[in-house]
Image (tube, grey):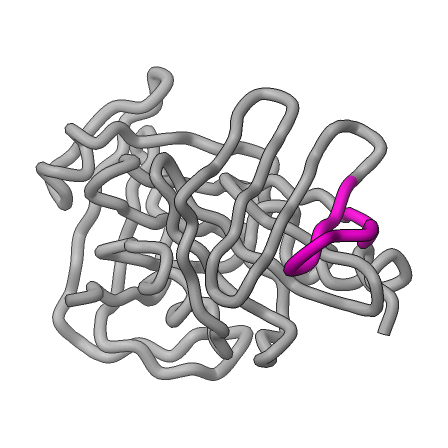
Amino acid sequence: MRLPALAGLLFLAACAGFPALPYSPPTYSAYRCDAGSFEVRLGDEAALVLWNGRKVSMQQIPAGSGARYRSDDGHALWLKGQEALFETPERSWRDCHGEQVDTPWRAAAVRGATFRATGHEPGWLVEIHPEFGGLIVLGYGTTRLFPTPKDAATFPAAFTVDGRQIAFTIHDEGCRDEMSGEYLPLTIVMTVDGTDHRGCGRFFS
């Protein structure tokens, strides 16, 4: 399995902002860092990293210990056991600790999210994180919004991100994901500028 050949297929299904599938240990892991979080899918001498609705593929390079990966545009990843360091041209993600995961919901929990919900037609995703704020992906990944830690602290109260009015209605009734068939405990309505987006979600304790 070589990631460059699979990257397009995986992230077509991922809609450019949704976690890649399938999740299958030991090839898929989630990490929580000092200032953010990310996920990694490993292939033969390659790594695919997803963070903040973005993705990058890197090739493995020689390493004195652990495993190192690098891309031509300045991204780098170092893995050793369950510790990691991820660098982008803009910043470094340090003090990262993670574990192997087999579902996007488990990945969100490992990364420290307190809430996650998804819906379809058009595809959307929301994650709330108490330290970093969160991520809202709309229109199959065409729009990404970043709630602040203040927004996360008052969730599910309504808030405004980049001029977009966001509100949530959470129903304590079961919901089955239309695409995966997975059963989730909550039915979610996310309203963006007056338009309802329906889906399924859950809180993480």
Question: Where, quadrant-wise, is the C terminus in this rendering?
Answer: bottom left
The residue that appears at 33% across and 29% down in the rendered structure is: 193
Give the magenta part as a residue range.
Answer: 58-70
Please tell me whether residue 35 is drawn above or below residue 203 in the rendered image. above
Residue 13 magenta-drawn?
A: no
Q: In x, y percent, where is residue 138?
A: 49, 41
Hey, which residue is sitting farthest front in the picture? 64
Q: In x, y percent, where is residue 160?
A: 25, 23
Q: How many marks?
A: 0
Q: In x, y percent, where is residue 153?
A: 11, 38
**Towards the viewer: 141 or 23:** 23
Question: Where, quadrant-wise, is the N terminus in this rendering?
Answer: bottom right
Q: Main secondary structure of the magenta part?
A: strand
Q: In x, y percent, where is residue 95?
A: 40, 44
The residue that appears at 46% across and 68% down in the rendered structure is: 104
Hey, which residue is sitting farthest top in the picture? 163
* Quarter holding residue 86: top right
**Towards the viewer: 91 or 140:** 91
Please tell me whether residue 102 is drawn above or below residue 79 in the rendered image. below
The residue that appears at 83% across and 62% down in the rendered structure is: 45
Please tell me whether residue 146 is drawn above or below residue 94 in the rendered image. above
Left or right of 23 on screen, residue 131: left
Left or right of 65 on screen, residue 187: left
The residue that appears at 47% across and 65% down in the rendered structure is: 82
